[in-house]
Image (spheres, rainbow, N blue to C red):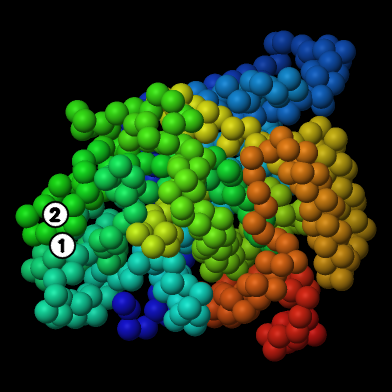
C-alpha cells in the first residue's frame, strides 16, 4: 500500500467537477424534463389577468414540483403516484431536482433553501475509485483494526514502487486493476506478473488485492448491490434499504491462474458484462434465491440462513462498513455544503442514493468494492422494477416534501433579508441552537416514518449508540479535513465545526479548541 497515505488525500479539482460517470450512462438516450422557455417580453401584448396569475399561484402553492433530468422510466412512474406532485415546466421553479449525473457546485449555490437535489457536492471523494482508496487508506493507517473491510489498495502510478514490491513473493498473487473513473466493468483486468502493471502516467488506476476465495452461489461468484440513502451531511443521516440485488457472474467460478485471467465472465460480477453472455439467465421469480444471474438480496439472506450462516452478524458488519466509509469523508461533504449554502440550517437541501457494492468471502466477511454515486435505475426485469421502485418511493417519503415546509422556509428567507436590511446579524449561538432543534425534530419525524412499517429503510446514523461506537474516527476525520482546508486556503463556517463537536457528547482536545475559540 501507499507509503504515506496522507499525501494527496483529497483532490480539490475532482471533488468540484461533475465528471463522475453514471453507472449505465451510455446505455440509454437521456430523458430530460421538458422545460418551457420564458416567452420574450413584448409591449404589444397585455399582461395576463390578475385573477389568472392568482389562480396559477394558488395551484402552485398546493403542489410539489419535480424536475427530472433522467433517462429512467421508473423515476417518472414513482413521481406520478403522488397526487400533489407535478412535473416542473421551469428550470428555476421546482421543489425536487433529480439528475442522473453529478451536479456542479455553482448550480447548487443557486438553489433556494426549500429546494432539494439528489447529489452532494464533493461525494466524488468516495465515488471515484482513487479518492475512495485514498480516504480509506488514510483511515486505516490511523485505525487499522476498524478499517479492514476493503481489500489492500494502491493508487497508480503514485504507489507504483510499493505495488511492484508485492510481486517479489514466491507465491503468485492476483491483483485486479480498475480505471479510477470507470463504470460497467469497462477497462478492468487481472494481473499476476509485474510486467503487466500499467505504466501509463497520463491515467490513474486503482490496484487491489483480488479476493480469490469468495462465497459462491450455485458455484458462481457474486456481489451485493445495496442502496444507501444519505439525506444529510452535518450531521450525517444514513439509511440502508432492506431490498438489494445479488449479481452473479455468468460462468462457474475457478480460482485465477495465468491461463484464465482474461475470462471476465468468471471473475467479474458486473451486470453490464455478464448480460452479454448467451448463458446469462434473467430472474423470473424475485422470491426465488436460486433463479437467474440476478437475485433478490432478501431471498438470498433466507437461503444463507438455511445453510447455517450467521446472517444477522453479517448485516451488522455491512452496516458498520457503510457508516465508516461515509464518516471518512463527512468533513469535506459538510464543508462544501456550508460553503455553497451558508444560510441553510436544516441540513436537508441534498440527498443521495448511493450504490454500495459489497462482496462476501468464504468466511462470510463483507468486503467493500466500490461506491456508485448514480446507481442504475433501469428496470429490465420484474426484480429490478420491484427493488428500484420501492427504493425510490421510500427515499422520497423520507424527504418530507410538502407545501407547508416550502412556505415556512420562504418566510424565514424573507425574515433574514429584513434583518440584514436593518443591519442585524444572527449570532453563532442562535444558529447552533437552531440546527440542534431542527435536527431533533427531524429525528422524531423520521423515526415515526420508519416505525409505521411502511418504509424499507433502516436508520444507520445518527443514533446515541453509533455516536459512541464511532467517536474515535470522527475527530481524526475532522483533523485531516482541517489540514486539507488550510492547505488549499479555504474557509469554512465555524458553526459547522462547533455544531459537530457539540453533538459528540464528549470532550476532545480538538473539540475544546474549536468550541471555545
Q: Along the line of sight, which residue is nearer the eye, 277 or 233?
A: 277
Q: Say which residue appears at 19% left-offset and 57% top-offset.
A: 255
In this figure, which residue is indicated by the disc labeled 2? 261
Q: Horizontal placement of 279 versus 293: left or right?
A: left
Q: Which sits earlier in the primary sequence, circle 2 or circle 1?
A: 1
For residue 32, the mark is none
Where the N terminus falls, by quadrant? bottom left
What crowding class fits label 2: few (fewer than 14 Cα within 10 Å), some (14-19), or many (20 or more)?
A: some
Where residue 448 appears, x then y in whole percent?
A: 81, 44
Q: Say which residue appears at 21% left-offset and 43% top-offset.
A: 252
Where residue 385 appears, x then y in whole percent?
A: 49, 27
Height in image: 365 above or below 442? below
In this figure, which residue is indicated by the disc labeled 1? 191
Where the C terminus falls, by quadrant? bottom right
Height in image: 181 above or below 44? below
Contact? badges 2 and 1 (CB < 8 Å):
yes
Q: Is residue 305 visible?
A: yes
Q: Toward which corner of the image does residue 212 lie, by quadrant?
A: bottom left
Where residue 177 appears, x then y in whole percent?
A: 24, 60
Where residue 388 appears, x then y in whole percent?
A: 52, 33
Q: Horizontal placement of 94 versus 414: left or right?
A: left
Amino acid at each position: 500500500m501507499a507509503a504515506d497515505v496522507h499525501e494527496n488525500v483529497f483532490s480539490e479539482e475532482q471533488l468540484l467537477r461533475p465528471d463522475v460517470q453514471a453507472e449505465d450512462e451510455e446505455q440509454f438516450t437521456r430523458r430530460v424534463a421538458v422545460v418551457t422557455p420564458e416567452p420574450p417580453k413584448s409591449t404589444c401584448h397585455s399582461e395576463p389577468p390578475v385573477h389568472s396569475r392568482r389562480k396559477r399561484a394558488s395551484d402552485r402553492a398546493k403542489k410539489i414540483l419535480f424536475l427530472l433530468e433522467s433517462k429512467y422510466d421508473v423515476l417518472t412512474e414513482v413521481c406520478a403516484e403522488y397526487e400533489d406532485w407535478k412535473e416542473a415546466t421551469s428550470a428555476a421553479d421546482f421543489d425536487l431536482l433529480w439528475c442522473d449525473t453529478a451536479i456542479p457546485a455553482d448550480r447548487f449555490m443557486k438553489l433556494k433553501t426549500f429546494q432539494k437535489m439528489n447529489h452532494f457536492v464533493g461525494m466524488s471523494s468516495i465515488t471515484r475509485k482513487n479518492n475512495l482508496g485514498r480516504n480509506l487508506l488514510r483511515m486505516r493507517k490511523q485505525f487499522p483494526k476498524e478499517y479492514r473491510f476493503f481489500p489492500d489498495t494502491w493508487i497508480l502510478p503514485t504507489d507504483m514502487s510499493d505495488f511492484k514490491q508485492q510481486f517479489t513473493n514466491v507465491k503468485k498473487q492476483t491483483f485486479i486493476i480498475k480505471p479510477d473513473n470507470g463504470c460497467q466493468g469497462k477497462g478492468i483486468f487481472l494481473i499476476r506478473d509485474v510486467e503487466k502493471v500499467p505504466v501509463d502516467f497520463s491515467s490513474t488506476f486503482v490496484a487491489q488485492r483480488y479476493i480469490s476465495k469468495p462465497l459462491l452461489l450455485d458455484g458462481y461468484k457474486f456481489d451485493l448491490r445495496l442502496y444507501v440513502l444519505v439525506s444529510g451531511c452535518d450531521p450525517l443521516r444514513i439509511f440502508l434499504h432492506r431490498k438489494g440485488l445479488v449479481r452473479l457472474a455468468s460462468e462457474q467460478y475457478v480460482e485465477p491462474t495465468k491461463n484464465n485471467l482474461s475470462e471476465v465472465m468468471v471473475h467479474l460480477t458486473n451486470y453490464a458484462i455478464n448480460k452479454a453472455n448467451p448463458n446469462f439467465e434473467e430472474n423470473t421469480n424475485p422470491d426465488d434465491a436460486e433463479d437467474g444471474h440476478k437475485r433478490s438480496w432478501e431471498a438470498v439472506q433466507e437461503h444463507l440462513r438455511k445453510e447455517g450462516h450467521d446472517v444477522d452478524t453479517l448485516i451488522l458488519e455491512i452496516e458498520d462498513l457503510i457508516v465508516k466509509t461515509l464518516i471518512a469523508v463527512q468533513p469535506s461533504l459538510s464543508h462544501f455544503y456550508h460553503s455553497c449554502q451558508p444560510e441553510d440550517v436544516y441540513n436537508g437541501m441534498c440527498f443521495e442514493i448511493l450504490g454500495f457494492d459489497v462482496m462476501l468471502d468464504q468466511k462470510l466477511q463483507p468486503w467493500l468494492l466500490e461506491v456508485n454515486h448514480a446507481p442504475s435505475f433501469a428496470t429490465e426485469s420484474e426484480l429490478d422494477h420491484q427493488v428500484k421502485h420501492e427504493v425510490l418511493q421510500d427515499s422520497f417519503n423520507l424527504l418530507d416534501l410538502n407545501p407547508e415546509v416550502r412556505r415556512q422556509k420562504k418566510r424565514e428567507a424573507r425574515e433574514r433579508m429584513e434583518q440584514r436590511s436593518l443591519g442585524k446579524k444572527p449570532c453563532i449561538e442562535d444558529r447552533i441552537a437552531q440546527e440542534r432543534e431542527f435536527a431533533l425534530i427531524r429525528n422524531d419525524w423520521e423515526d415515526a416514518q420508519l416505525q409505521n412499517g411502511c418504509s424499507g429503510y433502516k436508520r444507520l446514523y445518527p443514533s446515541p449508540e453509533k455516536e459512541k461506537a464511532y467517536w474515535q474516527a470522527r475527530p481524526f476525520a475532522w483533523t485531516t479535513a482541517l489540514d486539507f482546508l488550510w492547505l488549499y486556503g479555504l474557509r469554512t463556517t465555524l458553526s459547522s465545526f462547533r455544531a459537530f463537536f457539540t453533538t459528540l457528547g464528549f470532550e476532545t482536545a480538538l473539540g475544546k479548541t474549536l468550541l471555545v475559540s
